[in-house]
Amino acid sequence: MTVEIWTILFVGLSFILYTYIGWRSRVKDSSGFFVAGRGVPPIANGAATAADWMSAASFISMAGLISFLGYDGSIYLMGWTGGYVLLALLLAPYLRKFGKYTVPDFVGDRYYSNVARLVAVVAAIFVSLTYVAGQMRGVGIVFSRFLQVDVSTGVVIGMVIVGFFAVLGGMKGITWTQVAQYCVLIFAYLIPAIALSFILTGNPVPQLAFTFSDIAAKLNQVQADLGFIEYTQPFVNKSMLDVLFITIALMAGTAGLPHVIVRFYTVPDVRSARYSAGWALLFIAILYTTAPALSMFARYNLINSLHNQTIEEVHQLDWVNKWENTGLLAFEDKNGDGRLQMTPEEPSNEIIIDRDIIVLSTPEVAKLAPWVIALVAAGGLAAALSTASGLLLVISSSFAHDIYYRMINPEASETKRVFVGRIMVGFALVIAGYFGVNPPGFVAQVVAFAFGLAAASFFPVIMLGIFDKRTNKEGAIAGMVIGLTFTAVYIIGVKFAGMEPWFFGVSAEGIGTLGMVINLIVTFVVSRLTPPPPAEIQEMVEDLRTPAGELSAGAAGHF
């Protein structure tokens, strides 16, 4: 069978499975819609968390960025995995013990202020929309290749599918769908990596082949021959300071991501939250230890397949023609010598490859079986859809629960709250779809912006809210507003307004670290210059850190 038939088969079967799970898990009450009724077992929640967290950026784009950046691409590995450890060990159990639906709920009650809640809602929506735009772009790329349509059409198709799952089953349906999606995406990632590892090194274990074979030395030599810096040489594409800032922003951003944090509210108790965090870390590590090996294998294969070939020779490759049709792969014989050269200088480079197609195209470049190519397409869709669904629920709950129910209509019925939540999913989809069609960068870059915004807005107020009972509402509001505003202005200025990265050359992806530090300082200082929180709030924070029992004290009155 052809790749297209295999793709229709795998994608069709996986979608039938997701639809069945979503239909069986459909809900009518707000607890089921927003936190899956708090009845998800730890191992299932671990798989769902891994699928939710390993987005299109992890599956589709991360290996592509590492392929292009070499050593410097390790920022994504260190930042995202380190951040998850930070979240699992430092924040998640306490947030689960607090027992609220959402991060704005925690902020509003901990800082006894609806103004703080509203600022947190704005930050959650801002972060989640930025993040979900990257997922929609990933979905569009997959559909554009395997349905042979343009990326914009692919994004629209993805919008319809994501909206269906999010609206139907809420968090309960999404959770169990994500368990299935994790199984699909991890097999789709591992099978081609194992095959390539065996073909290129004779060792079927990618992690061992990456470490102990001579593939790195071979790629370094190929790079040197073409005029590139060696693949494993550090700080070539980014300065040491920028690497540090991006890594910290990704770590703190992970620990402040609303759609990941809400996962720990779906389990029965604090103990289950700890166990699900451990399971998720194991499930995540399987992909993240494979990614650097796949990145190296992919770059080596691409150079060998395309460099110094004639345009006629490359067009004899079926995968080349199909990726050219998407507009994500292009060739131009600029010097007229009849052959295509891959060079480090952009003006003379004759092979233009979008970083986001590296993982999806690698099985085709390596001439793997058609069913493997199709499986990767199904895995890419599973990764993008699982995260997009979770993000849409965050946006939905921010409006329906944190604004509508907690601030506008506290008497709203369960049915009314769920209805408002579903309407908000539709609005969020339209905005996310627009940015999926008109992205500000590659998938992983767009996602990195979201992490920077999360680091600059949420991480300090969550951490201080748990570990410093003296932090008050004035400090939290000032810190979030200033941190988020500074980071957003810097990112928008650098990416859209032509502004030079003025802070020691730190990129838009890394500026969230500075925003986080500013937020932390402002929150701490303002809290010390203004009256302390009420006694009952301070007692609540003390109780939050005790090892036993669930939080029973209610929040104080609202500002």
Image (cartoon, rainbow, N blue to C red):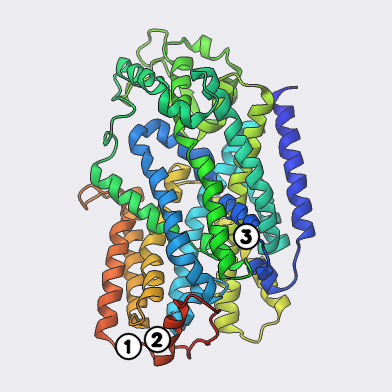
Where does the image place residue 221, in percent across and percent down from the top left?
33, 17
Query: Against 32, is 157 above or below?
Result: above
- What residue is drawn where x is 67% and y is 75%? 417
Instruction: Give coordinates of residue 546: x percent, y percent.
Output: 46, 78
How much space separates mark 1 and mark 2, taking CA atoms? 9 Å
Q: Which residue is mark 2?
A: 538
Secondary element under disc 3, as helix, strand or loop, is helix
In front of the other: label 3 or label 2? 3
Q: Which mark is residue 532?
A: 1
Type of the residue with mark 3:
Pro
Kindly check if marks 1 and 3 are in contact, taking CB atoms under 8 A apart as contact. no
The numbered disc on residue 338 is none
Q: How far is mark 1 from mark 3, CA to CA? A: 38 Å
Could you say which is closer to the camera, residue 308 or residue 423?
A: 308
- What whole-number distance in Å separates the C-alpha atoms at marks 3 and 2? 31 Å
Q: Who is closer to the viewer here, 233 or 15? A: 233
Contact check, label 1 and label 2, Cβ < 8 Å: yes
Q: Which residue corresponds to the image point at 76% horizontal and 63% vertical from the top-left?
A: 26
Badge 1 element? loop
Residue 261 visible to an observer of this rendering: yes
- When asked about the image quadrant of residue 455, the answer is bottom left
Q: Secondary structure at mark 2?
A: helix
Eyeballing the image, is 339 above or below 547? above
Tell me residue 386's x, y (percent). Answer: 61, 51
Disc on the earlier residue, 1 or 2: 1
Q: How many marks?
A: 3
Amino acid identity at mark 1: Pro
Name the residue tied to disc 3. Answer: 42
Name the quadrant of the C terminus.
bottom left
